[in-house]
């Protein structure tokens, strides 16, 4: 109800913890075999694209921003990330 993304672009499944004091949030994306990218990225080795992992993180941050009114306005956009590193591959069945 808070995030506007729908259908294939909905990359946030749940929020499990909010720390108001430290302004932190924990959430996840349930990655299934039915994801739109599974068939073609990479055939026989479905690996969640890093750009979608960044999008999932952005949606979690957007949820926090919108839910708790950190910014004014009707639209929250994602401007970019610096020095991103991925710790492990994300496959269908991951959370």
Image (cartoon, grey):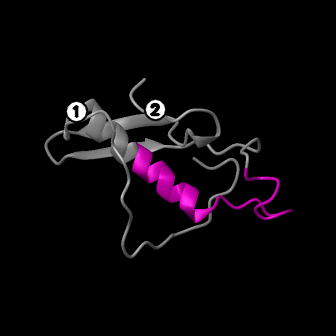
In the image, farthest residue toward the left: 21
Q: Quadrant of residue 80?
A: bottom left
Classify the position of the N terminus by image quarter.
top left
Residue at x 68%, y 47% (from the top left corner): 93
Q: Quadrant of residue 20?
A: top left
Residue at x 54%, y 43% (from the top left corner): 11
Q: Nearer the viewer, residue 4 or 90?
A: 4
Q: Quadrant of residue 74?
A: top left
**Where does the image place residue 38, in percent across and percent down from the top left?**
76, 53
Asked whether the viewer can see residue 26, the reply is no
Q: Which residues are magenta?
A: 37-59
**Where does the image place residue 54, in percent across and percent down from the top left?**
48, 58
Residue 4's label in the rendered image is 2
Examine the rendered structure and indicate whether residue 82 appears above or below residue 45. Answer: below
Examine the rendered structure and indicate whether residue 68 appears above or below residue 30. Answer: above
Asked whether the viewer can see residue 25, the reply is yes
Residue 68's label in the rendered image is 1
């Amino acid at each position: 109800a808070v995030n506007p993304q729908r259908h294939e672009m909905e990359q946030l499944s749940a929020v499990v913890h909010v720390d108001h004091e430290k302004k932190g949030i924990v959430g996840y994306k349930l990655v299934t075999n039915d994801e739109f990218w599974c068939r073609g990225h990479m055939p026989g080795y479905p690996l969640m694209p890093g750009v979608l992992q960044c999008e999932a993180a952005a949606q979690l941050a957007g949820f926090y921003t919108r839910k708790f009114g950190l910014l004014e306005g009707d639209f929250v956009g994602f401007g970019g990330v610096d020095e991103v590193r991925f710790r492990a591959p994300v496959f269908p069945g991951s959370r």
